[in-house]
Image (cartoon, rainbow, N blue to C red):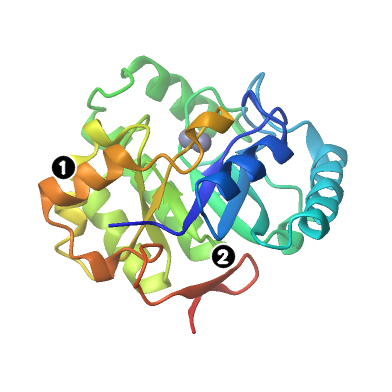
Amino acid sequence: MRAFADYHTHTVYSHGKGRIEDNVRAAIQRGLKSIGITDHGPGHFFIGVKGEKAFRRMQAEIRQLQEKYPQIEILFGVEANIVDVDGTIDVPAAILPELDILLVGYHKLVKPNSWSALRTGVKNFFSGWQGKASQSLREINTKAICATVRRYPVMAITHPGLQIDIDTLELAHVCAECGTLLEINSSYAGKLDNYVQAALTTDVRFVINSDAHTPERVGDFTAAYHLIRRVNVPLERVVNLEGAKRGVFRAGEKFIND
Ligand SMILES: [Zn+2]
Ligand SMILES: [Zn+2]
């Protein structure tokens, strides 16, 4: 089992430790063909990308690096946050169509867009990192993330069900319908068995990512491979494994098969 791409890595533009170039070099050393630079969206308190200007700087840096390192594909992306109960995300409107890949992660500690988002955010904050929310809160969360998938060209949902309690089976159904992938996150693989098992009962497809916050962890998929074997995920359902049918990821076009 061998993945050829890592679509989810962080840099100093959010709270990663390495520069974009450090991640790119690490990915080349690991033999990857493609790397996503996907820092946290600006709605994340303290750590998000600092607005549109910072996105532009990232984009320019990626273009330069792409010329310097033609042997690897470098994708300009983001791990966006859900900032409202209607599924609104925190990517500036001018940036969204420019992205190569759009990932969405449902996180705590995000600036709310409305009073109901604030109320929901506070309740989620106090329901524990892996704890169960009340049924009504879970329904609000699930409705929000499903609305995000329907509304935006989301390539993948990162670590489903990790920080915010949602109905992952319902999310998987909507993702299958919309062509959005679900992530098998190598940084949190030990906590994701239940969601992957539930998602396997639908037609959804998966993507393996490292969620590296340091260059050393770029392309480290060991825990994800273990999870895939443990839960028996059919390898053809993971889009970035060697031998898998590759698709094209464009923020404006969703996931399209070659
Ligand atoms: Zn995340
Ligand atoms: Zn991340």
Residue 90 is drawn in which quadrant?
top right
Where does label 2 land, which residue? 153
Q: Position of residue 75 (x, y in %)?
A: 66, 56
Point out the tag, 2 or 1, that comes first from the N-terminus: 2
Q: Nearer the viewer, residue 174 or 188?
A: 188
Callout 2, which amino acid? Pro
Characterize the local packing of mark 1: few (<14), some (14-19) or many (20 or more) Cα atoms within 10 angstroms. Answer: few
Characterize the local packing of mark 2: few (<14), some (14-19) or many (20 or more) Cα atoms within 10 angstroms. Answer: many
Where does label 1 land, which residue? 194
Residue 133 is drawn in which quadrant?
top left
Callout 1, which amino acid? Asn
Q: Position of residue 49 (x, y in %)?
A: 72, 33
Q: Is residue 26 above or below residue 233?
A: above
Residue at the (12%, 56%) spot, across then down: 232
Q: Secondary structure at mark 2?
A: loop
Q: Is residue 138 above or below residue 72?
A: above
Q: Residue furthest bottom?
A: 258
Residue at the (45%, 38%) spot, across then down: 106
Residue at the (69%, 47%) spot, across then down: 91
Q: Secondary structure at mark 1?
A: helix
> In the displayed structure, does residue 82 sit left or right of residue 204?
right
Residue at the (79%, 51%) spot, across then down: 65
